[in-house]
Structures are given as C-alpha cells and as structure tokens.
Image (spheres, grey):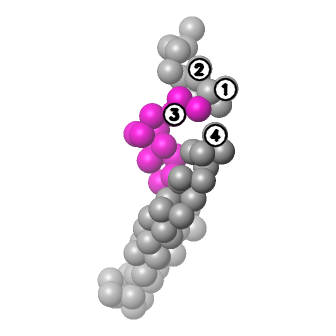
C-alpha cells in the first residue's frame, strides 16, 4: 500500500510537493541527448561554449515566471 502522498501524485491529485516538482522538471530536460551533447561540446570547444545548461535554466525560470500564476489560477 502506497502512502497517501504518493497516491495523490500518481492520480494527479495536485498535491505534488516542491521537491517532486523540481525533480520532475529536471528529469524532463536532463536526458541522454543533453548529457552526451553537453560533454561533446565541452570536449571539442571548451566549457565556455557549453551553453545548453544556461539556456535550459533561463527557459525554466522564464516559463515559471510567465505561466505559473495562470496555471495556478486555472487549477
């Protein structure tokens, strides 16, 4: 039997905690292509040109600032 918190998350009870939300957002971005591409760019061009972590971070922050209030209002 799963604890109540996990059941709420699994059935979309909208009781997802901050930690689960942050890990879910990170998991959607960090995948095999992201890891391989970042390491390849760092190896071939240097760490200065490894821009995907910066770009993805800015996109997540901007998306959160723009859409979080609308999504919470709409429930």
Residue range highlighted in magenta: 14-27
Q: CA distance from mark 1 to mark 4?
A: 15 Å
Magenta stretch encompasses residue 22: yes
Q: Residues within 10 Å of mark 4 (few under 14, many from 20)?
A: few
Quarter of the image for the N terminus: give it. Answer: top right
Q: Residue at x 60, y 45 (%)?
A: 73
Circles 3 and 1: CB atoms closer than 8 Å: no
Residue situated furthest left in the rendering: 47
Overall secondary structure of the magenta stretch? helix
Disc 3 is placed on an element classified as loop
What mark, if any, has residue 45 been given in the picture? none
- Residue 53 appears left or right of 73: left
Disc 1 is placed on an element classified as loop
Which badge, 3 or 4, is on the more N-terminal residue? 3
Residue 34 at least partly seen:
yes
Q: CA distance from mark 4 to mark 2?
A: 19 Å
Circles 2 and 1: CB atoms closer than 8 Å: yes
Instruction: Identify the image quadrant of residue 14.
Output: top right
- Say which of marks 4 and 2 sits in front: 4
Which badge, 2 or 3, is on the more N-terminal residue? 2
Which badge, 3 or 1, is on the more N-terminal residue? 1
Residue highlighted by disc 1? 11
What mark, if any, has residue 75 been given in the picture? 4
Q: Residue at x 47, y 54 (%)?
A: 26
What mark, if any, has residue 7 been given in the picture? 2
What mark, if any, has residue 16 been given in the picture? 3
Q: Residue at x 57, y 68 (%)?
A: 33
């Amino acid at each position: 039997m799963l604890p109540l918190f996990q059941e709420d998350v699994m059935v979309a009870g909208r009781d997802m905690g901050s930690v689960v939300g942050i890990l879910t957002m990170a998991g959607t971005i960090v995948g095999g292509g992201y890891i391989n591409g970042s390491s390849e760019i760092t190896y071939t061009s240097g760490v200065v040109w490894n821009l995907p972590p910066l770009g993805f971070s800015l996109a997540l922050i901007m998306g959160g600032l723009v859409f979080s209030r609308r999504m919470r209002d709409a429930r």
